Amino acid sequence: MSFWRVLLSILFPPLAVLDKGCGSILIVIILTLLGWVPGVIAALIILNNPKR
């Protein structure tokens, strides 16, 4: 996980997981709309997953 990807996930979480698939983007968008912090946490978890 690069520094730029982490910075992007903090500033705008849906853009950070753009290449991870449609389901990940939808989850992060919904969580970001519910609150910025849950969206950031979800984006960081998705980016930190070694299997994807």
Image: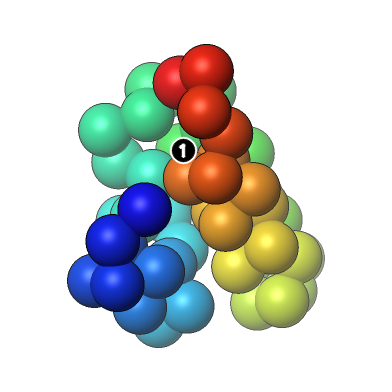
| Amino acid found under the numbered disc labelled 1 | Ile
Quarter assignment of residue 7? bottom left
Q: Is residue 48 visible?
A: yes
Q: Residue 8: in sight, yes or no?
A: no
22 shown above or below 29: above
**Looking at the image, which residue is at 40% across and 69% down?**
6
Q: Return the x and y of residue 43 as percentages of the image width and height.
A: 55, 54
In this rendering, the answer to whether 23 lies above or below 19 is above
Q: Nearer the viewer, residue 39 or 48?
A: 48
Q: Residue at x 36, y 53 (%)?
A: 1
Query: Does residue 40 appear left or right of residue 18 in this picture?
Result: right
Q: Residues within 10 Å of mark 1 (few under 14, many from 20)?
A: many
Q: How many marks?
A: 1
Vertical relation: 15 (above or below) 22: below
Q: Is residue 45 left or right of residue 7?
A: right
Q: Is residue 24 left or right of residue 8?
A: right
Q: Residue furthest top?
A: 51
Q: Position of residue 47 (x, y in %)?
A: 48, 45
SS at mark 1? helix
Q: Position of residue 11 (x, y in %)?
A: 40, 81
Q: Tell me how the rendering is colored.
A: rainbow
Q: Which residue is mark 1?
A: 25
Position of the C terminus, as image quadrant, is top left
In the image, residue 3 above or below residue 42:
below
Closer to us: 47 or 17:
47
Left or right placement of residue 2 versus residue 6 in this view: left
